[in-house]
Image: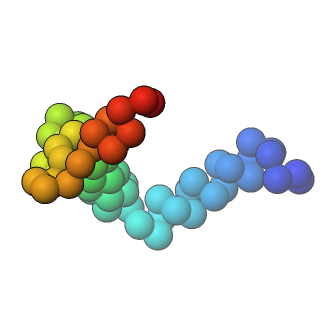
Amino acid sequence: MGFGSIWHWVIVLVIVLLLFGSGKISNIMGDVAKGIKSFKKGMKDEDDNPPPSAGKTIEGQATAKEKDPVA
């Protein structure tokens, strides 16, 4: 009986179902799905709102063009 045998996986699945029950597994998978959706939403919100300092210069400091007009 190899590691990839279908019977191996059937037995493992039956044992997991007996230990946890189908209700608890579906609850866990629902929680995982909610977490993934929340993570994706957070990543999307982060991409839509760049940091406030992006593209701004600090008052009183010269930019690279002002320091070296030849470049």
Residue 26 against residue 66 in the figure, above or below: below
Q: Is residue 66 above or below residue 11?
A: above
Q: Quadrant of the C terminus?
A: top left
In front of the other: 23 or 31: 31
Write down the quadrant of residue 5 in the picture.
top right
Q: Is residue 9 visible?
A: yes
Residue that appears at 89% across and 53% down = 1
Question: Where in the figure is residue 24, as x and y percent of width and height?
Answer: 31, 61
Query: Farthest residue in the bottom direction?
Result: 19
- Residue pictured at 32% horizontal, 53% vertical: 32
Image side of residue 41 versus residue 21, left or right: left
Q: Outermost residue, right direction?
A: 1
Residue 71 vs 19, above or below: the answer is: above
Residue at (68% x, 50% y) in the render? 9
Q: Is residue 55 left or right of residue 18?
A: left
**Residue 63 position within the rendered picture, expressed as x and y whole percent measured from the top left:** 27, 43
Question: Does residue 37 appear anywhere in the picture?
Answer: no
Q: Residue at x 47, y 59 (%)?
A: 17
Is residue 57 or residue 47 the one in the foreground? Answer: 57
- Is 60 placed left or right of 7 in the picture? left
The x and y percentages for residue 37 are 25, 43
